[in-house]
Amino acid sequence: NAGVTQTPKFQVLKTGQSMTLQCAQDMNHEYMSWYRQDPGMGLRLIHYSVGAGITDQGEVPNGYNVSRSTTEDFPLRLLSAAPSQTSVYFCASSSTGSGDYGYTFGSGTRLTVV
Amino acid sequence: AQSVSQHNHHVILSEAASLELGCNYSYGGTVNLFWYVQYPGQHLQLLLKYFSGDPLVKGIKGFEAEFIKSKFSFNLRKPSVQWSDTAEYFCAVTSHNNNDMRFGAGTRLTVKP
């Protein structure tokens, strides 16, 4: 009964480096999304996916890429890390985008870009 | 796209005080409304949700929220808070026409023992 699993939990990057944040769910949810959480700004949607092979942009997509090759996995790629991307990143999944049963969130990845 | 505003950034209460956290949304269509709680160092957990029907929704841990359509509001209430309610609370909205959940900026609640 793992739910949504995010790795790594903590990461420090240098400016310009790239990396991939991993997200996996075992609930057979079609909908998955990535948020970043910054103090005083709540959670802002980066990208989302309504099923394998289908992705779309959210509020703050610049500097991030996603792909959805399987129902289970939804990795988030930082192409060239910048200090402005220092944040806590949460992955979420749901059976539907409108959240009929609410979203299930992962435990988060705390990313620091120096 | 829909948006959410939460009126209070930080609320400080003593134990047994009553709580009301404000939430307003802007969207012209049919919406689903949520309150999530985030305890220190943890991820978001669903407190309650409203989709349709009775506008007074009861959630876990004694929380409730009232949907007032004419005011575009979905305020969270609890009659008597406990120290363990210290957390950050987020209001969120989805619509029936799109596929993303939008969050408010959050309200940090501190309950003094």
Image (tube, grey):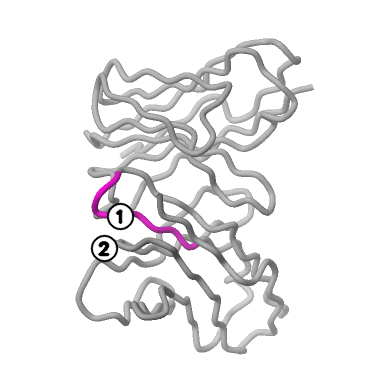
Judged by its main secondary structure, the magenta piece is strand
Q: What residue occupies the far top of the structure in this picture? A: A17
The residue that label 2 is drawn on is B30
Is residue A89 found left or right of B14 in the rendered image? Answer: left
| Residue stretch rendered in magenta on the structure | B91-98
Chain bearing mark 1: B
Instruction: Estimate the x, y position of residue A6 in percent, counting from the top left.
Output: 47, 30
Discs 1 and 2 share one subunit: yes
N-terminal of the pair, mark 1 or mark 2, is: 2
Image quadrant where residue B109 sits: bottom right
Is residue A85 found left or right of A101 in the rendered image? Answer: right
Instruction: Estimate the x, y position of residue B44 in percent, counting from the top left.
Output: 49, 52
Determine the residue positioned at 29% across, 80% down. Answer: B55
In front of the other: B57 or B80: B57
Can you say whether A36 is above or below B7 in the image?
above
- Please identify the quadrant where the N terminus of chain A is shown: top left
The residue that label 1 is drawn on is B95
Secondary structure of the residue carrying numbered label 1: strand
Instruction: Estimate the x, y position of residue B85 in percent, counting from the top left.
Output: 58, 71
